[in-house]
Structures are given as C-alpha cells and as structure tokens.
Amino acid sequence: MAEITIGRRKFFIPEKGSPCDLWRTYFTKLKSEVGAENAKMLWLITWDKNGSASCTTNAAFNKWLKRNEIDVSSAASRAVADVSAIGANILGLSKNMTKALSFGVPILLGGVTIVILMVLFNTAKKADLSDVAAITPIGRAAKLTGNLKRLGR
C-alpha cells in the first residue's frame, strides 16, 4: 500500500481494491490535516488514479460523497446505487410484511374456522332424521322410493 507524507503525518493511500470505508477514513484524515477544500482536491486526485467503481454503486458511499460535496460517480453508477437502495427498501418492507402476516394469517384462519363452525351448527339445528338418513346409501334409496310413490309410479 502506498503512502503519502503531509507535514509530519503519513497517510496510507487506498488502492483500487480497497474497501469503501478506507476511502472515507482517508478523506477524514486528509481533512483534519489540510482542511476540507484541500482534502477534497487530494482525495479526488487519488480517486482518479485508484478509485473503486464498486464504491460508486454503494448507496451509503454515495450518500457520504454527497454529504461531503464530492462528485465522482457517473449517472449510470448512481442509477445502480439507487436501484440497490430501492431493493433494500423493498426487502425491509417484506420483513415488516412478514411480521404483519405472522399475526394476520392466524387471525384470518381463526375467523374462517368460526364462520364454518357457525354454518355447520345452524345447519345441524335445522336438520331432521330424514336428512341424517340421506347421508347413508340405504337412506338415499328409501328417500328415492318415497319420492317415486308420491309421483304415482
């Protein structure tokens, strides 16, 4: 890893494969040593030579860049970062929906069960012995012959 000396302090310069947090730390150390404007200039020169494209597709890194008024990303990489942020929000929403569904589904199933039981109970109250007999094959045959007698056959 390369290093630069500013005043009496040495700074490690991030390379292409360096993580985004190292780039943030590098800027913070530059800013404390040479001030915000000079730090931006030095940071941008370093970024131009060693910048990591994967950082520009990271939504958190792009927010950090915006907060520090640094613009290094192209419109395409900003769009990718925005899409990844939208994806993260959708995943967060699905987690919240999962929590809601974990309560909602049992409540809904309980309600449906209660309605079915009420229908069965009301049907059973109105049923008589001939309805019960119609469930069996012999009862159906007896009911059929009873209907035939009424028709006069």
Image (spheres, helix red, strand yellow):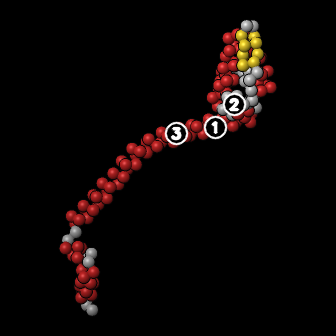
Q: Residues within 10 Å of mark 1 (few under 14, many from 20)?
A: some
Q: Is residue 91 above or below residue 145?
A: above
Question: If the image is split into quadrants, where does the N terminus sit?
Answer: top right
Q: Are marks 1 and 3 in contact (CB under 8 Å)?
A: no
- Look at the numbered disc 3 and give the secondary structure of its residue: helix
Say if residue 20 shows up in the picture.
yes
Nearest the viewer among 98 and 32 is 32
Q: CA distance from mark 2 to mark 3?
A: 25 Å
> Label 1 is placed on what type of residue?
Ser
Nearest the viewer among 76 and 24 is 24
Q: Are marks 2 and 3 in contact (CB under 8 Å)?
A: no
> Label 2 is placed on what type of residue?
Cys
In this rendering, the label closer to the viewer, 1 or 2: 2
Relative side of 104 to 62, left or right: left
Q: Position of residue 46 (x, y in %)?
A: 77, 22
Q: Which residue is mark 1?
A: 84
Q: Residue furthest bottom?
A: 153
- Look at the numbered disc 1 and give the secondary structure of its residue: helix
Q: Which residue is mark 2?
A: 55
Q: Position of residue 34 (x, y in %)?
A: 73, 10
